[in-house]
Image (cartoon, rainbow, N blue to C red):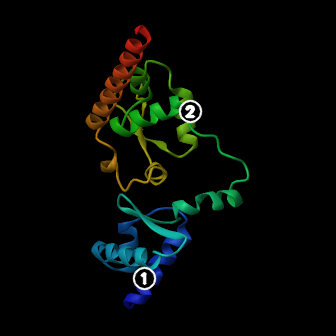
Amino acid sequence: MNEKERLAAFEAILFASGESVPKDAIAESLEITEEEVEELYVKLSEKYKDSGIAVIKLDTDYQLTTKKEYYEYVRRVTEPKRNTPLSNAALEALSIIAYKQPVTRSQVDYIRGVDSSSSMSRLINCGLIEAIGVSDAPGRPSLYATTKEFLRVFGLESLEDLPDIGMLEREIELEESDQLAIDTDETEEAEE
């Protein structure tokens, strides 16, 4: 198989699967190395540069998808029912799972200080988290982690692309100190 045929086969595999495909499965199917799969990814990305389609990398998987700027047009056709956005509680649970995974529901409940059953059920239904095993703790509770869909939805190549938690804490502290300064200025103006 020549290079042009390998590229076409790589594209066909991604198109036909409709989901992300592991690099090793592609390499095995095309009888090439994983490094050659990476080269095909770069070439296919270049091919789609001026297209409404993109090939994306999700950790060690690849997937064909529509470009973000065309999402709204595609959504109008493919999703007649508008999906409701995630609640703040679900986003909070999702962020805990993303940073602490694998984690049990009771660990998420403990960190949040409230029951997270409903939020976690919604996240599972959205395909953003999944049970990946069981804990050795009493009762053998399920362990949860984020999915490849989570990476796709949030535009991440891997979990290493998540913002540094320490950096986020510093930004929150800065915002709070800025708000305190604004509140103090407003109080001083009101007193004058």
**Where does residue 142 sit, x and y in percent of width and height?**
43, 33
Q: Which residue is mark 2?
A: 87
Say which of 191 and 2 sits in front. 191
Residue 17 in the image: above or below residue 167? below
How many residues crowd mark 2 within 10 Å: few (<14), some (14–19), many (20+)?
Answer: few
Kind of element beneath mark 2: loop
Q: Amino acid at mark 1?
A: Leu
Q: Residue at x 38, y 91 (%)?
A: 2
Q: CA distance from mark 1 to mark 2?
A: 41 Å
Q: Residue at x 69, y 54 (%)?
A: 79
Q: Is residue 29 visible?
A: yes
Asked if residue 174 lies left or right of residue 70, the reply is: left
How many residues crowd mark 1 within 10 Å: few (<14), some (14–19), many (20+)?
Answer: some
**Where does residue 133 sit, x and y in percent of width and height?**
40, 40
**Where does residue 140 sit, x and y in percent of width and height?**
40, 29
In primary-sequence order, the first of circles 1 and 2 is 1
Q: Is residue 28 visible?
A: no
Q: Amino acid at mark 2?
A: Ser
Q: Which residue is mark 1?
A: 7
The quarter of the displayed image where residue 6 is located:
bottom left
Quarter placement of the N terminus: bottom left
The quarter of the displayed image where residue 59 is located:
bottom left
